[in-house]
Image (cartoon, grey):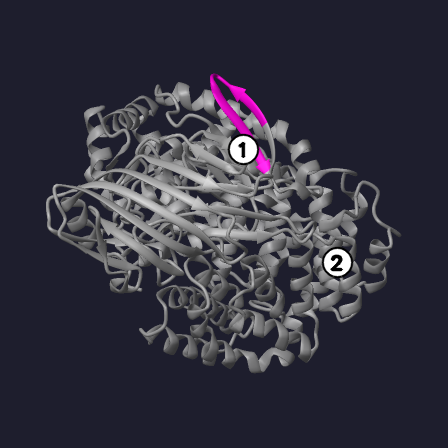
Amino acid sequence: MPSLTVDGARTRAAALSVQSYDVDLDLTQGERTFGSITVIRFTASSPSSWIDVKPDELISVTLNGTAVDVAGLNDGRLELDGLQAENELVVVASMLYSHDGEGLHRAVDAADGLAYTYAMSFLDAGPRIFACFDQPDLKAPYRFKVTAPEEWLVLGNGAATQVSPGRWELAETKPLSTYFVTVVAGPYHQITDAHDGIALSVVSRQSLKDALDREAADIFEVTKQSFDAYHRMFGYRYPFGDYHQAFVPEFNAGAMENPGCVTFRDQMVFRSAVTDGERSQRARTIVHEMAHQWFGDTVTMKWWNDLWLNESFAEYMAHRVSTEATRYTDNWIDFAYIRKWWGLQADQRSSTHPVAADAVKDALASLGDFDGISYAKGAAVLKQLAAYLGDDVFLAGVNAHIAANEFGNATFADLVAKWTEAGAVGLDDWAQAWLRTPGVDTITVSRTATGIKLHRKAPEAYPAARPHKLTVGGYDAEGRRTTVDVLIDADEVDVDLDPSLAVVIPDAGDDSWAKIRLDSVSLENLAALLPKIKDGVTRAVILNSVRDAVADAELDSKVGFDVVLGMLPTETSDIAVGTLLNWSNTHLLGVYLPYEPHRGQLADVLRARLETVEVGSSVQLSVARGFARFSDDVDRLKGWLADDGVPAGVTMDADLRWIVTLQLARLGAIGEAEIDAELARDSSSEGNVHATRCRAALPTAAAKERAWAQITTDADIANYELYAASEGFWHPTQAELTASYVDRFFAEIPGTEKLRSGWVVGTSTKLAFPRYAVEQRVVDKAADLIADESVAAAIRRSVGDSADDLKRALAVRSAF
C-alpha cells in the first residue's frame, strides 16, 4: 500500500482534530481473527479525508449515522466524504492476528500450548488492530474494552478493570499518538508492586514464571530508581497512571515505550545464566523506555523525521541515568564497544543520513533511518551538547520543552528554541554541523619535536567543520596515564603532551563521534601496553580504532586479529570479550581473513583462557560461549552435553546447550535426531527457535533447501523462527554447499515482501544475505536489485547496507 507522506499528514492534520477513540476488541473468535469495533469522534474543517484500516474483512462503516460503502477500501485507506464540523465514525471489522511482531501479534508457547497476544502499533501497524487516523500528530485519548477468555489477564495504556468474567475495561488515557497504543492479553503471569504512588507490575508467559519470579526484584529496583532519577531531573511527574512492563513473546524490537504499558522482548526474562553485561543491558533498556514517557510520549514529534530525537534522547538518558542511579556502572563501556560501533558502521555506508533529517521521506521510508545513527550517533551528539551547554542549560531547555508541549507534538526547532531561551548560543551552527550533515570525521595523531598534533578530517562527500570536545590520553611504557582536555575547533590543533609517550589515544574517554587513528609509534607499542590500560572505555576506543582501520583497509586484518588474540587472555570485561568474539565472527573469520587457520588460533586462545579465568565469573561465561562457538573439538563439545569435562563454574543450562548443539550441527557431528533429542529436553518456544537455527546449520542439501523454503516461501512462519533459519543458513565452511543459493537470494528475496510486512521484511533480508560470498559479482547483483524500484524499499535498504559491507571486505582482501 502507499505509505503516508509528510504532505498528506500535514493536510489531514490541518483539517482534523480527534477528540476520542473508543475501541472494543473481541479476542474470543478463534486463532485466526479477532473482532474490532472503533468509534472515533473528531472535528473537521474539510468535507473529505480518509481513515486508515487494514482488516481481514471490513464489515461496516458508519459516518454520522450514514453507511459508508466498504467497497471503497483501497490499500488500507477508506475515503470519507461529507464530513461535518463534528463527526462520529464507527468502524466494524474482523482483523487478522499477526505472526510478524506487528499489529496484534498472537504467539502459542510450545512449552504448554498457551496462546498470548500483544499489540504493537509502531509506525503503520495500528490500523491492523483498530481504525484510526494513523499519524503521530493526531493525538487523542483512548478508551478500550476487551473481551477475552476468562482465564486471561488484560493490560493496556489505561488502568484495566475486569468488569465481568472475560470482559475488561481500560481507563481513558491521556492524548496518545496512534503508534503508542497497546493491549497485552493472555494467561500472563503477573507480579505487582508500587512506588511513589505509581502501581507497578511485570508480566511474562507462564512458562517463564520461575524466571520472572527470580528476576522481578532486579527489574523493580531499576524501575524505582529510574522513576526517582527522572522525577528529580525533569521536575515533572510521570503522567500516565499505572506502569506495567510486559515481557512478551516474539517481539521484534528490544522494547516499545507504550505509555503505561511498556512491552519488552521476553528474552530479558533470563531463563539461563547471563553475564553482568547482559543484566546491565536489560537495565538500560528499562531506563531507555522510561525516558520516553517524557520525551516521546508526553511530547511527541510531529513527523517521523524527528523520531531520532526521541531515540537519541532516550539512548543518552539510558546510559547516563543507569550509571547515576542504578548498580550497573558499565554503561559507557557498552556504549563504546557495541552501540557506538553499530552507529559508526551505519554512518559510513551509502545509506548514511543526517541525525536530524529533513521531512521528505514517507512513513515507511522513515523506518529505514531507524538505525545506529538515530540511536547511537544522536546519543553521542547529545552527550557532547550537554557538556557544551552545561547541565543546567541542557536540562532547563528540556524541561521547558516538556512543560510547553505536554500531550502535544513538537519539532526539533521547538526544542532548540527552549535551549536558546535557557541561555544556549550558537546552536544553529552546531546543529547544522552535527545533526543536519551526515558522515563521521577522522581524527589522527602526529608527533612533533615538542608535542602532539591532532588532525581533523571530514569525509569528502559531507564536508563540515564539526567541533570535538574530548580528552587525549598518553601512556608511558609503564602504563602511567596523562590526560589533556582538548577542543578541536580547527583542522589541526596542538596538544601539550610529551611526544615520547609510548601510546597516544585521542578521545580516550569516548566523548565525541569520530574515527580515531593511532599513529605508527602507538600501534607498535600497543601490544605491550594494552594489558596495562585498565580503563574499560579507553580499551574500547582502542579496539574501535583498530576495527575501523581494518574495515577501511588501512590496517592489515591480520594485525587486527592479533589484537583480538592479545586482548582475550587478560580481558576482564565480559562486554569486551563478547565484542572481540562477535567481531571475529561477523568480520574477520571467513570475511576479511580465511576461516582457517584463524578459527583454530582463536579456539586455542579461548581453550587456554578457560584454564585461567575466574570460576563462576561473567568473563568465564563469555569465554565458555566463545569456545563452544569456535571449537572443532567434537569429543569435548559432546562431553559438555553429557556433563563431562565442563569447566567448574559453568552450568550447562538450556541456552549454553543450544550453543554447543549449533556448533556440532555446523560441524556435521550431529544430525536431525540429536537436534530433536535436544528439543525434547527443551520443548519451549525458545527451544523451537534454537532447533530451527541448528537444522538450518546442518551441512546437508536437504537441510539447506528446507531452511531456504522457510526464508523465502513460508508466510506463516513466526518471526523468530524466520530469523533463526536465516542465521543458521550461511557459514564459511559450507560455501560449496550453499553456492547455488547466492543467485537464488537475489532472485527470490524480493518476493518475501508479499509474505510479510513492516520490520520483519528488512530484518530477514539482512540476516539472509550471502555475507560470506565475498565476490565482485555478488556486489554487482546487489546493485541490480537496489536499482529495481519495484522491489520493496526495506529489502533494497538491507541489501544495500550488506553490499556496502561486502565492498569493504573486497577492499580489505585486495589490500592485504
The residues bearing labels 1 and 2 have C-alpha atoms spaced at a distance of 52 Å
Q: Nearer the viewer, residue 814 or 363?
A: 363
Residue located at (26% from left, 29% from top): 401
The image's mark for residue 679 is 2
Picture residue at 31% right of the left edge, 48% below the top: 355
**Rendered position, 520 above or below 16:** below
Which residues make up the magenta segment?
A: 192-203
How many residues crowd mark 1 within 10 Å: few (<14), some (14–19), many (20+)?
A: some
Image spot of residue 503 (x, y percent): 53, 43
Q: Principal SS element in the magenta part?
A: strand
Residue at 48%, 50% in the rendered image:
341
At mark 2, the secondary structure is helix
Q: Taking 681 as reference, is 160 above or below it?
A: above
Against 771, residue 477 (above or below) is above
Q: 10 Å neighbourhood of mark 2: few (<14), some, or many (≥20)?
A: many
Look at the image and say whether residue 198 sits in the magenta stretch.
yes
Residue 176 picture quarter? top left
Between disc 1 and disc 2, the foreground one is 2
Q: Amino acid at mark 2?
A: Leu
Q: Is residue 307 left or right of residue 104?
A: left
Q: Left of 108 or right of it: where is 800?
A: left
Report the residue marked by disc 1. 481
